[in-house]
Each structure stands twice: as C-alpha cells, then as structure tokens.
C-alpha cells in the first residue's frame, strides 16, 4: 500500500495538530444529534417491536402494549436520571467500562466492555438495516437490495467518521432535527384532525390478527414481558452521552447532563405519542403477513409508515418526508456507535486489553482503527443476517442492560466512597440523593436484564450470551500476551549492547541489473565476515546464463546457485539459510534483498511477491537479519518528490492555521 | 501471515516434486468430467434459455425453438470438429491465445485472452448459480440463500483445485457420469411410456403464455436469433479440452480429440433430447410468472425439472435424483474454468502480460494464484448480480465466440503455412481437409458472434464489450511496465558493485529491552560511520523516563528523542530521516527496526504495526536502507522448531515416495 497514505490524505484531509484538539469540542446543539441520534431514532421501531410480539397472541392481547409502553417510559426516565449523575461524577468520560473499572474491579469492567462492544456493533447493524427498511417500504422497487444498501451506508458512515467528529456533527444535525420536527408535526396534525371529529384508522386496522397460539397465565405474562423487552430498544445509546462528556463544550458535565435530559424528554414524548397513535389507529403488524390473513410475501409497511400515511392522508409529500427523515436519522443513529466504539476501544488499548494501535490516534484525531473495525464487524453481521431486522434485533438490548446495570452499580459504590471522604461530607444530602437515584436505577435495570435474558434467550440472545465471554476471554488473553511479552523482553539493569562476533552476508540476486549491483554495493559497506550472492534457478540453463553474465561483469563476489525442485523461489533459500553453518552462537547471517520500489499501487503486485514471503519466513530463523535495499524506479522517485512537497506544504499550512487560531481562540466552541 | 504456510500445508497437502508432474497426466475417463463438465452440464439450461426468450413472443412463436435447436446442434458439431484439428496441431495445448499468438499476432492473441478470461469467470458464476437454482427449485425452503450458497460452492471448488488437478478428477467423475446416466434414463422412460400410448404433459402445459409484445417481420427474426444466441450456452467450454491437451495421457492429441468427439456426441443427443421432450410436453416457462398468468412471486420450476417430474411421474426418487445430479454437474462445471483459467493466466504471466507470480507454480503444481483470482472474480460477480441466472447469462457467450472465431481463423493460417512447407507436402490432401473444416468453423462462429452481439448487446452484453478492451489495455499495460522496468534496471556491460562511501545507522527504540539491545548490538557489527538511537515520545514525561533508563544502563549510543505532535509514530521518524544531512550522494542511512516475531497468527496484529507502515514509507527515500532485526519470542521459537522438523519430515517422505514411484512407474496414468 505504498500509495495508500496519499489516497488517505485525499480522503480524510490533512492531519490536525493535537494542540488544536480543543477546537473539536461540541456545543449542545451539535452534541445532541451526534450522541443521541440512536435513542431518538429508536422510537421509529420500538413501538412496532412491541406490537409484533403481541401479535403472536392475537387481537385479544394487543391492549397489553399500553402496559409495555408505560413501563418503558418509566424505565427511560430512570436510566436518564441515573446517567445524569454519571456525567457529573465522571467529567473525564464515564462509560460503563471506566465506572466499573474504578468501582467494581477489572472483571466487571471487562464484562461491561464486552457488552458495550457487542452493542455498538448491533447499533450500527440494527439502525442501518431499519433505516434501509424505511427506504424500501417507501420505494418498494428497491426491495431485495437491502444488504447492498446497508453495507453501502455503513461504509459511508465509516468514511465520514474517518474525516473527524466535528464535520460529522454538522452533517448529522439536519436529519436528526428534521426527524424530531416531522414527528411532532405528525402529532399536531393528528390532534387537530381528531379534535375536528375525524376518525383516523390505519390501513391495517381491518386486518385480522390471527394468534399463533393462545397465551394465558404465565405464558401471557411472558409474552407481555417479551413485548416490553423488545420495546426497550428505545433505551439503547444512552451510554454514549456519559461516555462522550470530554467531547462536550465547557461546562462539560453540565452540558452533557442537560443534553441527556433533553434527549430523555424528546424520546419519551415521541415514543409514547407514536404508541398512542398506533393504538388509536389500530395499527396491526405481524412478522408473517399470513398472520394478517394476507398472501405470503405481501409487502407490509412499518407501523410508523402506516401511522404517517393515516395521519397525513392525502398530503403524500408529508408522508414521504416522514419516511425520508426516518431513514436518515436511523442510518445516522449508527453514528452514535461510531463515536462510542472507538473511544472505548482506545481505552481498552491503553489498558492493553486490545491491540495498542487502537489506542494510538490516527492522523485526524479520531481512532481510525476502531472505526474501521466497527464498520467491518457491522458489515459481517448485516451480511450474515441477510439484513433482516427482526432477526438482528433479538441480539440487541441484552448487552445494553448488562452495561446499564454494571455502571449504575458502580455509581452506587462511587457515591458511597464519596460519603466516606470528608470532602464529600460538605453536601452529604446531595450525594445521598444521587446515591438513591443510581441505586434505584441499578435495581431496575438489573430486573429488566433478567427479563430480557429470559424472554429473548431462545430467540437469538443466546448468541450474545456466547459472544460476551468469548470477547471477555479474548481481552484477557491480549492483556496476558502483552504482560508475558514485556516480561520476556525485560533486561537486567545495567545490561548493554555488545558488537556481535561475525556478520555473514547473503545477497539474493535474480539477474545482473542495477538493483542487484546496488544491493551488492551496500553489502560491501557492511565489512562482512563473508559475502556471497545467492540465486534460485528453476532450470540449469537459466543458471548458466546468469553465471556467464556474472563472469562477464567480473563481479568479485562468489555466486551460489540453488536449484528449485518445487518451482518455488522461497523454499530453496529457506533451506540454504537453515542449513548454513555460519549461523552459530554469536554470529549472524544478514540476508540482503534488493527490493523494487514502485510509485503506483497497481504496480505493487507486479514485484517483490516472493521477496515478501521470503522475509516473513526468514525472520523466524535464529541469528538471521533481513536487509531491504530498495531500488526506486522512476515512478517511485516521482511519488517521493510529491510527498516531500506535500509534507512541506502541510507544515506551512499548519503554521499559518495556528497563527490564525491564535487570533480567534473562541472558534469552534 | 506467519502461520499461513502451516495452515496451507494442512489444507493443500505436502508439495510435489516437479519431476513427478507426469504422475498427474489424465486418462480419458478422468479427463472427460474435468474438461467437459461445462459443455455437458449446459444442456441443463440451454433449452430453457431458448424457451424463455421465445416466451416473450407468446405461444404462437414457441415452435421457433425447433429451428434454434437444430441450428445449435449443427454449430456444436462444427465447432467440435474444428477443435479436434487444434488438438492435433497443438499437442502442447492450443488455447485460442496460443493459436492466435502464433498465427495472427499479439493483438489477436490478447483479444482472445481477454475474451477467455471473462468467459472463465462467467462459467464459474453461471454454472454455480444455475446449480444452486436446481437445488432451490427442489428444496424451496433454501430459496433466498442463493448468494450465500453460490459463494460457498465457489470457495469449495477453489479449495479442491488448490489440492491439485488429479484429486479433483476423481471427485468430479461421479456426478458428471451420474448426470449423463440419469438424462438417458429419462429419455428411455419417456420413450417407453409414450410408446405404450401414454400422453405426457408438463405441469405448465396448460398455462397461457402471454406475449409481452407481438413480434413480426424483422422483430420476429431477431427474437428467433436471440433465442438461438441464448441457446448457444451449450457450446461454452469446448475450448478447455484443446487448451488442456498436455494434461492428457499419451497419445495426448489423439486422446484429447477423442474426448472432444465423445463430449460432442453426448452434448448433441442430450440437448436435442431435452428440447424434444420440452416441446412434446409443452413446457411453458417465463422470466416473470405473471406472463404465465400466475401471481407475482409464484415459484416456478426449471424446464428440466418440469420434464423430469412429468417423465418420472410418481417415481419421485428419480426426479430428486435428476435434480441432485443436475445441481452436482452444474456446480462442478465451474471446475472446467478452474482448470482453464490458471493455465491461461500462467501463459500470460510467462509472456509478462500478467503478474509474474501467476506464472510461478504453487507448491502443489497448480497455479494457485490463478485459482484464487478466478474464485474471487466469480464471487464478486455472483454477489453483484445477486445470483440471478437470467441476468448473468446475458454476459455469457459473447467472449466464447470471440475466442472461437479467432482460434479457428488462426488454425486456417496455420494449415496454410503447413501447406507452404515441403514437410506438409507429404499429405496435402489431409491438410486441405483440416483447412476446410477450420475455415468453415471460422466463418460460422464469426456469423454467430455477430448475431450474439446484435441480439444480446442491450441485454447486458455491453458490459463485456466494455470489459474486454479494459482487460486488453490492462495486459498491454502490464507488459509495458515490465519492459520499462527491465530497461530501467539494465546495466552497462562490465559494470560492477563498489563499496559505498559511508553508512550512517539509526536504531529505532521504544524502550530499553532485549529487542532494542539486540538491534543495537547488530548495528555495532556494521562498523557504521555514525550510530544513533532514535525514539518517538508522545509526551516529554515518557521521553524523560526512557532517557533516565538509557543512562542507568550506560548505553554508549547517543539517544535522539523526536516529539510527536500528530500522535503518530511514523511521521516524526520520516521527517527526521528526510531532513537528515547524512543522506548525501554516495552515503546511505540504514534504519534498524527491532521487530517482534511471534508464533501465532493472532499475536501478529498486536505488534509491529507502526514498524510496518514506517518501512513501506522509508523505502521511498533516496539512499535509505531498512534493516529488520528480529527478536523471536518464545512462541516464534517453537514454531520455527516445528517448521524445521516438518521440513526434514517432508524431505524424508519425498525420498521414500520417489523410491516407491520408481517401482510403480505406470502409477496414476
């Protein structure tokens, strides 16, 4: 990928100096869409998920949706209240991982981390897929391309996020606010029309809802609880705000808590409003159209789409606007995860529970690796589940409530410690209040966790139940590996390098040309104990030709020809080195490989393939060192020159920009 | 991919000595299924494709299928006759590329090559997809997983072929012969039943065929020609036999020609038989079920499935057998391409029109790279076209007839040259006959090519019309690149290497540990003009810690700390080297990178990420050399030991096997 970074520069723009990190702080109006598009958008399908489950019980049990909805509203308010406390307690970012780590220890923290990682991936998959569903239900001709479209949108999101959080903030504000506006407009229209005596009914109101089986007693309770659990999708993503406190403009904690409150208010009203309309309009939905007495494969609209069509009636333009903004906000909801996941990944990287490069910041002040990783995981999931929302949603929620419970429990521990410290004594009353809120939140979310586990286990949640320990073990394993390595490479105090006894140099040559001569020249400057040229010949004739040229040029380096019975360049060289007698205790064999350096990515596969494979194998051998002597072809020299110019230009630009920023310190906050 | 080759060994078995290549020669009975499963299996859909096109014209025009079928039979006989000549003329393998290259020059050859490459990919895609269609039409519940299943089968085929041609021969014989047997059995049953007075009709016989539009005059002729063109799928893959002559057992040419004749006989009878039954049973098919007066989305069976069901009536077991073997042979038909494509790719690699590594044989005496490339291309195509046969098939055929025409034309040139030589004078009559056959073949295929182009262009063939020149240009470009490079690296006679003036060494260190010390030790053995240790610090504190340890250890190498404003390890080092004054005319800077070598693939991403990116960038700089000093961690040392043992074992096994073969020389032929 020689040209990769040039392309990267083009795509994600010039790097930012970390001194200018402050510039990317977010005002509330920008933070809301970035961190809350997930919980806000989930109202688009939460109601439907409740009705879908209850539909299994037939018309008779649909009224249970009221109870489920009320339960979810209460839960939402409690969770928001709890997380507001976290924002104040952890201005540095209080994700479930951090809170659990500080208060409940590493095991709890890693459990929370695995739960969160899974749910970030699920958020991307579920949001994008349901967004695409909104599109296809408005434009049926696109049906059947769901997978391709979903993958495309995930890729676009990844790309936007690689460009940096601030830009994305701008991009994402519009659809989120548009969604909120259209939903409330819909409520207003519905209210006015009904007030003026109109009776609005959904297109599906007259369809029968045939019970799959009759539920009563425990079964009925379980069904109701399962409906409730499915509706809890409305709560996903609350985590993101408390996690992202440091990204908020000052006063960080206050702004974050405020944003949470606003989000809570919006979610509750929109979710409840939609549910009310769904019940009043008698929206009937079912996973399988036959349950509604329709022919198999008959396309059915989403609950929200039905409500919209019923409400706006002949004002088709408004209906399409609704579908458009719904699709938009749902796809962007995935962005919440694109902000949360990389942050968490980098924290895990810092604590060495994940590869270090996740901790290392990319050029553009975002955790590029985490973003790419998340996008890939989501794409795999979407393809594997064939972009079917109903199947994906079963894997959702579980992780959310694991992290909810852990982080609330952690907060309880936190406040109790506060109480112990005299500092805390100042406003014990205040702390007691916070403690109470978090304690209640912890209990409630714990109960819901159990409900989700029981009601969704057989419907797919078991996958998560397996995946979480796997992730957990994986992270433990990574940490163990890093610890083992650093122990292994540790040196006794005062130990210092010493020159090795002998350095025997082998130069690989294919023919007598500039790169080979260059490599030989370099080898001579190493003052080696011995210097040999090595070549691999598939047939003797080839070997003879080379030997002849070698002598014609009068090259004063002995040429060793290796025959290749397996038609492989790599094996003979490996065998030769493996069996070399020089590779003794304190001596070393340096293998010099002349490498063709080309300037265009498409030239890359045309060269050095064997050399690459050879290198990776040689590095395994005791007392072997690999030396790349590059021979830069014309195209590479051009690219190098370009890069040098680009580097200078960038530096100049940075300087100019920095000067500019000095004049406008308030910029961007 | 340190563990890659271990896995590879496990998957594709131990390498073969090229001396034992003879062992993989194929007897006719094995060659037939390997090289002919494509043309044989295409009879499974050729008839249906004819009917599908004619259905557009409604019931009235279905009888035109007779003319199309007869035309195709004649064409098939002519093409087979033509290619038999090629087998005799080119015992070394007479693919369209070779024949065109020798007789019509490079432009024609590359045109043929691009046509062939495209059609090999198409063969894999079309065959596998239609095979999967046969499965889903027998097991409707699998419907909707077509893409996943197709991709899976392509992957399996690639894997089998990586194991080597001979094994695959064995694997592929059974279904091919089973298919032939079941088809003829079906004919027999049909004959007997009808002879005994039964009137057999297809399930769709009573369905109306509603004309999409009424065709008459030119339009009708074009429709008939388009039907004919679609039916020509029956001819695909004839190429493979003449291409694979060297893989046949001696007498190669004769066996190949014979195999072609047998294939021709089987194809003609099976194709015509199926068409007859389709007409007699009045099988009605249409791309869109509504044309048959059915509800949209109604699942319809393939023509062959309908014939089978009608013929075997209540003997359901036989019907399912038919579907099973059809699916089997269709999926294996793709194997024809897996044999042809890599051979062609390697010839192109040899002539430097494709990357060299395609020429280079893999461990297992098959062109691994070509196989992998083909599989990937086919998968992309299958996913892109959503595994829809009717859309894929439009891209088919065109390339086939381009290569047919070119190779026949080339043969004409060939025979005329033969006539010119006195050697040929011996049996001029014979040569005249061959010349006539090829001349007729060339004309006929040329005419068909025009028909295909006209009738299919707007239906997707235009994609191929664009793709072929692109491939052509690509291959030209590769050749130009290789020529340019070899010109660029050529050296004047008598030129020889000379020691460079100075070698300044930089050692990258992150902390004072064994790998760093090892790297420093090695650096000292290079007798450098200057030796400096370089480190990158994200913050001053970090730097101070390192400097302190450095002094505590009393390391006698100056330590240079680079600050990292962009939180990147790579950029500061690049800048430092770029601005180093030592990089003058004849001096060189050697950058020593301590590399962690780990034994497990999953440990790989945990290390060296920055080092890798750094290396690829440094190689671009003038007078810079990169030195990898590996530090092998415990896991790597184990793996290395394993490999050494494995290598010894393999060598021993080879020796033993060789001895065994000496005893049974006839083995495998």
Image (cartoon, coloured by chain):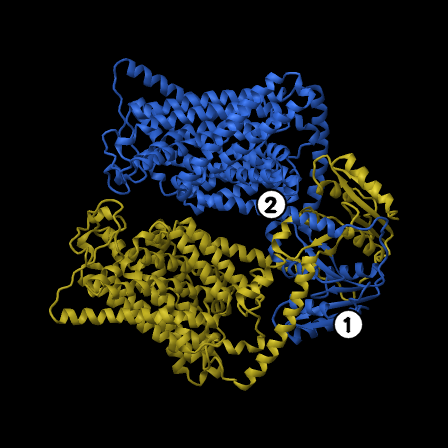
Chain colours: A blue, B yellow
Q: State whether residue B188 is above or below residue B481.
A: below
Image point (32%, 54%), residue name: B455
Disc 2 and disc 1 on one polypeptide chain: yes
Is label 2 in a helix, a strand or a loop?
helix
Chain for disc number 1: A
Q: Camera-side residue: B54 or A291?
A: A291
User: Which dot marks residue A269?
Assistant: none
Q: State whether residue B369 is above or below residue A179.
A: below
Q: Camera-side residue: B310 or A567?
A: B310
User: Which of label 2 and label 1 is nearer to you?
Assistant: 2
The residue most toward the top is A196
x and y percent of residue B391 in the render? 35, 51
Residue A178 visible in the displayed image? no
Does the residue at mark 2 contact the one at mark 1 (Cβ under 8 Å)? Answer: no
x and y percent of residue A375 in the render? 52, 41
User: Which dot marks residue A551?
Assistant: 1
Q: Is residue B630 left or right of residue A8?
A: right
Residue where numbered disc 2 is placed: A475
x and y percent of residue B628 in the render? 74, 55
Dot 1: few (<14), some (14–19), or many (≥20) neighbours within 10 Å? some
Count the labels in the image.
2
Label 2 to label 1: alpha-carbon separation: 58 Å
Q: State whether residue A327 is above or below residue A629.
A: above
Q: State whether residue A333 is above or below residue B338.
A: above
Q: Within the image, what quadrant is residue A132 found in?
A: top left
Chain for disc number 2: A
Q: Is residue A506 left or right of residue B200?
A: right
């Amino acid at each position: 990928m020689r040209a990769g970074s040039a392309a990267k520069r083009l795509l994600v723009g010039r790097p930012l100096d970390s001194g200018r990190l402050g510039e990317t702080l977010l005002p509330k109006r920008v933070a809301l869409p970035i961190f809350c598009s997930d919980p806000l958008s989930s109202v688009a399908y939460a109601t439907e998920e409740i009705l879908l489950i209850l539909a299994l019980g037939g018309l008779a049990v649909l009224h249970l949706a009221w109870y489920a909805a009320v339960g979810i509203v209460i839960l939402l308010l409690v969770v928001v209240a709890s997380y507001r406390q976290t924002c104040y307690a952890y201005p540095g970012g209080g994700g479930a991982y951090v809170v659990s780590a500080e208060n409940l220890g590493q095991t709890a923290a890693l459990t929370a981390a695995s739960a969160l990682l899974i749910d970030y991936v699920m958020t991307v998959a579920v949001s994008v897929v349901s967004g695409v569903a909104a599109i296809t239900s408005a434009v049926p001709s696109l049906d059947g391309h769901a997978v391709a479209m979903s993958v495309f949108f995930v890729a676009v999101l990844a790309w936007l996020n690689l460009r940096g959080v601030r830009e994305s903030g701008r991009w994402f504000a519009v659809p989120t606010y548009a969604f909120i506006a259209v939903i409330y407009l819909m409520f207003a229209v519905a209210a006015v029309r009904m007030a003026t005596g109109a009776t609005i009914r959904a297109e599906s109101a007259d369809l029968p809802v045939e019970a799959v089986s009759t539920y009563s007693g425990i079964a009925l309770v379980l069904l109701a609880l399962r409906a409730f659990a499915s509706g809890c999708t409305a709560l996903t993503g609350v985590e993101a705000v408390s996690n992202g406190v440091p990204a908020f403009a000052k006063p960080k904690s206050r702004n974050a808590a405020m944003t949470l409150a606003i989000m809570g208010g919006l979610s509750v009203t929109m979710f409840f409003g939609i549910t009310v309309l769904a019940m009043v309009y008698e929206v009937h939905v079912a996973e399988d159209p036959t349950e509604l007495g329709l022919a198999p494969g008959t396309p059915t609209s989403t609950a929200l789409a039905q409500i919209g069509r019923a409400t706006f009636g002949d004002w088709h333009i408004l209906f399409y606007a609704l579908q458009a903004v719904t699709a938009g906000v749902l796809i962007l909801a995935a962005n919440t995860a694109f902000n949360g996941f990389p942050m968490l990944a980098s924290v895990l990287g810092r604590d060495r529970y994940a590869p270090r490069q996740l901790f290392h910041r990319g050029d553009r002040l975002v955790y590029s690796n985490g973003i790419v990783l998340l996008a890939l995981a989501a794409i795999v999931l979407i393809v594997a589940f064939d972009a079917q929302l109903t199947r994906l949603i079963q894997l959702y929620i579980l992780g959310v409530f694991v992290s909810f419970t852990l982080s609330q429990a952690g907060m309880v521990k936190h406040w109790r410690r506060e109480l112990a410290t005299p500092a805390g004594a100042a406003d014990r009353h205040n702390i007691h209040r916070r403690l109470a809120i978090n304690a209640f939140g912890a209990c409630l979310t714990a109960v819901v966790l159990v409900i989700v586990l029981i009601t969704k286990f057989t419907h797919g949640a078991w996958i998560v139940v397996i995946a979480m320990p796997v992730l957990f073990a994986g992270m433990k394993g990574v940490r163990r590996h890093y610890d083992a390595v650093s122990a292994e490479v540790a040196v006794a105090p005062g130990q210092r390098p010493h020159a090795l006894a002998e350095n025997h140099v082998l130069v690989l040559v294919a023919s007598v040309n500039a790169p080979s001569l260059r490599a030989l020249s370099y080898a001579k400057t190493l003052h080696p104990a011995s210097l040999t040229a090595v070549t691999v010949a598939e047939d003797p004739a080839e070997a003879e030709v080379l030997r002849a040229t070698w002598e014609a040029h009068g090259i004063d380096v002995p040429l060793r020809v290796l025959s290749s019975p397996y038609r492989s360049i790599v094996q003979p060289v490996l065998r030769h080195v493996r069996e070399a007698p020089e590779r003794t205790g304190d001596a070393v064999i340096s293998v010099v490989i002349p490498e063709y350096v080309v300037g265009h990515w498409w030239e890359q596969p045309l060269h050095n393939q064997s050399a690459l494979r050879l290198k990776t194998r040689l590095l395994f051998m005791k007392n072997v060192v690999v030396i790349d002597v590059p021979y830069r072809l014309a195209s590479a020299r051009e690219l190098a020159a370009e890069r040098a110019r680009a580097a200078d230009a960038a530096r100049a630009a940075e300087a100019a920009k920095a000067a500019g920023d000095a004049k406008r310190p308030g910029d961007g906050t």
